[in-house]
């Protein structure tokens, strides 16, 4: 796909004498222009933009500007309206050159962070980093993602392509069917929740695991650079280096022990940091693989939730001291208050759903939030200018309900939405979802709101 040319100012262009050239790569000429290149016969040597005083010398293993540029386009997707993304994009060419120089000069600044609280489905503390560091997180993910997929257990489903929440539930249902021989013999379901999984994570343990993966499996001349970026990002300590743009009172909804602001230095992983999301997916990987070796049970893991189906309840419960010991070595504890062990016929709540025999229902909280969202939108002002958000919200819930074994509830929700918002929404029978009426389409709303023509 052709990439539009971008312009560097004179100062940035002077600081970047060479950028590697290859098929469909990027070239920087003396006028300061980046241009897409389709020359398949280009054999120019790849040079780093950071080695400013030694232009022309081989610098294999250094971070290259064109790779950061590609990563930036990935990192900014779905974030272009955020404050830090807008500020970065206003002068993104110079910002990328500065980032590249900082990485190669080992001067990465990880302090631009901010924190906020989300309240649905339950209150959580979220940390986000400025685009400057967000690019580094995505750079690490792009480099290490193939290794993560090979190293992680097939029974771990969080933060992986093709292995999300719905895939985890589907795998669990198949496990129940398999272990009960199609619901014809006894089996027991065990749910174990890890207490304060992210807030209580040990930074040094998690970092050692990531550096071990890089050392053992990563192949490339930039291994030291990847290790430096990983170590710097995971030791960023965002609770001591962040800005808060929301009321501090929001934190009253979170238990004090679940906030990184109340943790000592070296304890706690930041929910929202991509490097930490990947690290915590691997944190108990060895324990999960150990559980897989037992033929009388099946296990699936989604972040801090562990679900087990076993044909021998007594034998599994006898393993609990060993499980606790292995988790304790990682400074992880089980939440005894939420421990669940019942016959499969009783069903189980799993990731916002309830599975019982071969059926899957949305739990009561999801149904309640769906109908509460209708009431919330009915109280909203100027809905005519927010129809895209209204459509997205209603389609999210109708999609959840219609994929469960609860068609009556889904139909009741569909009728109530059409009754409440018939001015804006209609039902698209072909796509089986809500759609905007013609006069409230996105382009039409912009034309009416800002009095412009396309």
Image (tube, rainbow, N blue to C red):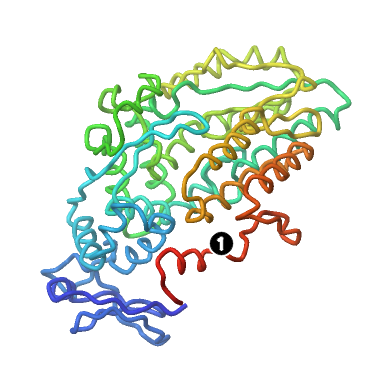
Residue at the spot 45% in from the left edge and 28% down from the top edge: 123
Residue at the spot 52% in from the left edge and 32% down from the top edge: 121
Q: Position of residue 154 (x, y in %)?
A: 61, 42
Which residue is more in the foreground, 420 or 317? 420
Badge 1 marks a residue whose secondary structure is helix
Q: Position of residue 152 (x, y in %)?
A: 53, 42
Which residue is more in the foreground, 414 or 143? 414
Q: Is residue 185 above or below residue 156?
A: above
Circle 1 is placed at which residue position?
440
Instruction: Name which quarter of the figure residue 32 lies in.
Output: bottom left
Left or right, 217 with respect to 137, comes to right
Left or right, 30 with respect to 71, comes to left
Which residue is more in the foreground, 56 or 70? 70
Q: Is residue 97 above or below residue 191?
A: below
Mark 1 Cα within 10 Å, few/some/many (few <14, many 20+)?
many
Residue at the spot 66% in from the left edge and 42% down from the top edge: 400
Left or right, 108 with respect to 159, comes to left
Instruction: Name which quarter of the figure residue 398 lies in.
Output: top right
Residue at the spot 62% in from the left edge and 54% down from the top edge: 423
Left or right, 103 with respect to 413, comes to left
Q: Position of residue 93 (x, y in %)?
A: 24, 68
Q: Is residue 429 above or below residue 33?
A: above
């Amino acid at each position: 796909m052709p990439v539009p040319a971008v312009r560097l100012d004179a100062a940035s262009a002077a600081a970047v004498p060479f950028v590697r050239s290859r098929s469909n790569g990027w070239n920087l000429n003396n006028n300061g222009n980046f241009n897409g290149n389709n020359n398949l016969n280009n054999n120019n040597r790849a040079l780093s933009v950071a080695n400013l005083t030694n232009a022309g010398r081989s610098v294999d293993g250094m971070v290259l500007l064109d790779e950061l540029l590609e990563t930036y386009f990935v990192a900014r997707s779905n974030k272009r309206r955020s404050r830090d993304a807008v500020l970065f994009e206003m002068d993104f060419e110079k910002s990328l050159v500065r980032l590249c120089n900082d990485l190669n000069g080992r001067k990465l600044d990880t302090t631009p962070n901010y924190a906020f609280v989300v309240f649905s489905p339950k209150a959580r503390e979220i940390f986000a980093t400025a685009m400057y560091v967000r690019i580094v997180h995505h750079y690490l993910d792009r480099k290490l993602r193939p290794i993560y997929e090979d190293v992680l257990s097939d029974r771990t489903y969080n933060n992986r392509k093709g292995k999300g929440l719905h895939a985890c539930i589907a795998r669990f249902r198949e496990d129940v069917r398999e272990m009960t021989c199609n619901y014809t013999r006894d089996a027991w379901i065990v749910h174990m929740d890890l207490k304060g999984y992210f807030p209580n994570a040990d930074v040094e343990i998690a970092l050692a695991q990531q550096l071990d993966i890089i050392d053992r499996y990563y192949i490339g001349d930039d291994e030291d650079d990847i290790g430096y970026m990983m170590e710097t990002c995971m030791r960023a300590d965002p609770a001591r280096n962040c800005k808060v743009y929301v009321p501090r009172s929001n934190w009253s909804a979170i238990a004090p022990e679940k906030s990184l602001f109340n943790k000592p230095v070296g304890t706690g992983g930041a929910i929202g940091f991509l490097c930490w999301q990947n690290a915590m997916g691997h944190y108990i990987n060895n324990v999960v693989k150990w559980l897989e070796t037992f033929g009388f049970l099946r296990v699936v893991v989604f972040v801090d939730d562990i679900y087990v189906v076993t044909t021998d309840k007594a034998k599994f419960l006898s393993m609990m001291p060993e499980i606790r010991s292995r988790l304790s070595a990682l400074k992880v504890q089980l939440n005894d208050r939420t421990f669940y062990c019942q016959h499969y016929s009783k069903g189980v709540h799993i990731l916002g759903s309830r599975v019982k025999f071969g059926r899957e229902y949305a739990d009561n909280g999801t149904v309640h939030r769906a109908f509460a969202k209708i009431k919330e939108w009915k109280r909203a002002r100027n809905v005519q200018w927010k129809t895209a958000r209204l459509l997205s919200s209603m389609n999210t819930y109708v999609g959840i309900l219609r994929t469960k074994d609860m068609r009556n509830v889904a139909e009741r929700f569909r009728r109530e939405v059409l009754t409440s918002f018939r001015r804006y929404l209609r039902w698209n029978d072909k796509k089986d979802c809500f759609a905007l009426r013609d006069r409230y389409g996105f382009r039409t709303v912009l034309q009416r709101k800002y009095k412009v023509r396309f």
